[in-house]
């Protein structure tokens, strides 16, 4: 599903791309008429617009699937159900209606996410903090169990043609565009049945138990 930011960036990329093509055609026309200076200026302008179009298009594709974040919000609702010693099932229900269940091992449920913060310049283009849930896993309290016990981990991220987090990690030159990119994780005990809210803010993730009076009644 395309976000408003992705749609705007894609539209801007298309506009800049079309303008770049027009300038490059104009450059060719000027060259055919022997106007080298005019061709050079149009060529430089066309190349600049083409670079901008490619950059905006890449950001637009890269942010598809990420959620824009301007305040604390619920990223998912998690139901915990113990199934055995250091074993439990976690069912995630997302705001868009999707749900998924995972068989996990450990004493606690842990969720982490990628968070991208943009520079003030990018903020002017409408880019604000974005996040994407990355994985869910079981976590053991004992370090010895963490080293030797059976682990279970599942990906919550979606495949995308451009991975902005990986791109930023490889290219320090993008620091002018991405102010910060980091991971955030949160975990709580999973030794009893519970209903949890996974909340995300510009400072990271938080798991909070839902009060009983806010839980929907069970179906017969």
Image (tube, grey):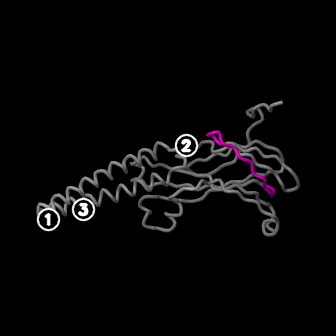
Q: Which residues are magenta?
A: 94-107
Q: Which mark is residue 36?
A: 1
User: Which callout, 2 or 1, points at the residue further toward the start of the chain?
Assistant: 1
In the image shown, does 99 or 145 lie closer to the viewer? 99
- Badge 2 marks a residue whose secondary structure is loop
User: Which callout, 1 or 3, points at the residue further toward the start of the chain?
Assistant: 1
- Badge 1 marks a residue whose secondary structure is helix
Quarter occupied by the N terminus: top right
Given this view, does label 2 or label 1 mark the residue nearer the observer? 1
Res 5 → quadrant: top left
Q: CA distance from mark 2 to mark 1?
A: 53 Å
Q: Which residue is mark 2?
A: 71
Q: Which residue is mark 3?
A: 44
Residue 45 image point, x, y percent? 25, 58
Q: How many marks?
A: 3
Given this view, does label 2 or label 3 mark the residue nearer the observer? 3
Tell me if 218 is positioned left or right of 169 in this view. Answer: right
Q: Residue furthest right?
A: 85
In the image shown, does 55 or 127 lie closer to the viewer? 55
Quarter occupied by the C terminus: top right
Res 186 → quadrant: bottom right
Residue 197 image point, x, y percent? 69, 43
Q: CA distance from mark 1 to mark 3?
A: 12 Å
């Amino acid at each position: 599903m395309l976000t408003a930011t992705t749609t705007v960036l894609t539209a801007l990329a298309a506009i800049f791309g079309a303008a770049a093509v027009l300038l490059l055609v104009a450059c060719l026309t000027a060259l055919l008429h022997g106007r080298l200076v005019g061709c050079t200026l149009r060529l430089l302008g066309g190349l600049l617009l083409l670079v901008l179009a490619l950059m905006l298009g890449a950001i637009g594709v890269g942010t598809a699937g990420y959620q824009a974040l301007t305040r604390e919000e619920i990223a998912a609702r998690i139901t915990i159900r113990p199934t055995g010693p250091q074993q439990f099932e976690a069912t995630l229900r997302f705001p868009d209606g999707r749900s998924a269940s995972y068989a996990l091992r450990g004493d606690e449920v842990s969720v982490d996410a990628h968070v991208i913060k943009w520079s003030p310049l990018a903020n002017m283009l409408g880019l604000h903090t974005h996040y994407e849930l990355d994985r869910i896993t079981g976590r053991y309290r004992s370090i010895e169990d963490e080293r030797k016990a059976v682990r279970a981990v599942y990906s919550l991220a979606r495949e995308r043609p451009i991975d902005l987090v990986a791109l930023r990690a490889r290219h320090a030159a993008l620091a002018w565009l991405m102010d910060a990119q980091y991971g955030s994780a949160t975990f709580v005990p999973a030794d009893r049945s519970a209903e949890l809210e996974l909340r995300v803010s510009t400072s990271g993730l938080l798991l909070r138990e839902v009060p009983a009076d806010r839980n929907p009644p069970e179906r017969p």
